[in-house]
Amino acid sequence: SKYLSLLGICALQCLLLVGILYPSLKLYEYGFNPLLMFTVALLTASVGIALGLQVSSLFSSSEAAVGTLPLILIPQIVFGGLIVYVKEMPTLAKWLSYATTTRWSFNALLKTGDELYKSGAAAYEQKTVAMHGILYLLGFKTDTDPLDTGLPLALLCSVLAGMTIVLLVSTLITLQVRNRRLGL
């Protein structure tokens, strides 16, 4: 019940996020689909909720659970592929990036559009580039074939849904083990 109530709150937040960013950044000019953006944002939030529930089930105090947040969030930021391109990461970091939600959700969010802005040589120069070029630059696809657009959006969303399910099941198992130990 916690998961569903938190998912409802997150759905409203995702709706507001997409509702504000889509028109203000003029994402419609680049072929972004607001419904797909909302879906990816909600799937990402779903993994975040499940991860939060898993962490809270592992600790008996809220202080201990809150104390682990930096240990969980910093790798999400570092290995997501935006700060350091995945293709430029060392081998171990690339492997660690597969375990982060942000890598999959960032890739999926990019897949909801057709093109993006890219800075030119001078600071004032902006040009649009096709999304497959950006995916190669960021390292989300390994083939240099321009027709290769990386993993399909449906597969990326399936990975996010799978992460949610794994985290929710592991939370249930953790709670059952704890209740058996306490005799509940």
Image (tube, rainbow, N blue to C red):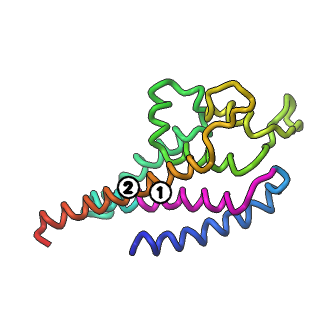
158 to the left or right of 123: left
Q: Residue at x 35, y 58 (%)?
A: 54
Q: Nearer the viewer, residue 12 or 37?
A: 37
Q: Residue at x 54, y 27 (%)?
A: 89
Q: Amino acid at mark 2?
A: Leu
Q: Is residue 49 magenta?
A: yes
Mark 1 and mark 2: Cα distance apart in space: 8 Å
Q: Earlier in the sequence, mark 1 or mark 2?
A: 1
Percent position (x, y) of residue 125?
89, 36
Residue 160, above or below 140: below
Predominant secondary structure in magenta?
Answer: helix
The image shows residue 4 at horizontal and vertical percentages of 45, 72
Magenta span has 2? no
**Which residue is painted at 57% across and 62% down in the image?**
42
Query: Residue 135's spot in the image, x, y percent?
Result: 68, 36
Q: Look at mark 1 in the image and give the residue it sits on.
A: 47
The answer to whether the residues at label 1 and label 2 have Cβ atoms under 8 Å apart is yes
* Position of residue 132 in the picture relative to residue 85 (left or right): right
Q: Which contiguous range is marked in magenta?
A: 31-51
Q: Amino acid at mark 1?
A: Val
Q: Residue 122, relative to residue 100: is it above or below? A: above
Q: Residue at x 27, y 63 (%)?
A: 61
Residue at the disc numbered 2: 167
Closest to the observer: 164 or 84? Answer: 164
Residue 77, disc: none
Q: Is residue 127 left or right of residue 57?
A: right
Specify few, some or many for label 1: CA neighbours under 10 Å numbering under 14, 14-19, or 20 or more. many
Q: Quadrant of the C terminus?
A: bottom left
Q: Which secondary structure, mark 2?
A: helix
Answer with left or right where residue 143 lies relative to residue 99: right
- From the image, which quarter does the N terminus lie in? bottom left
Q: Nearer the viewer, residue 182 or 141?
A: 141
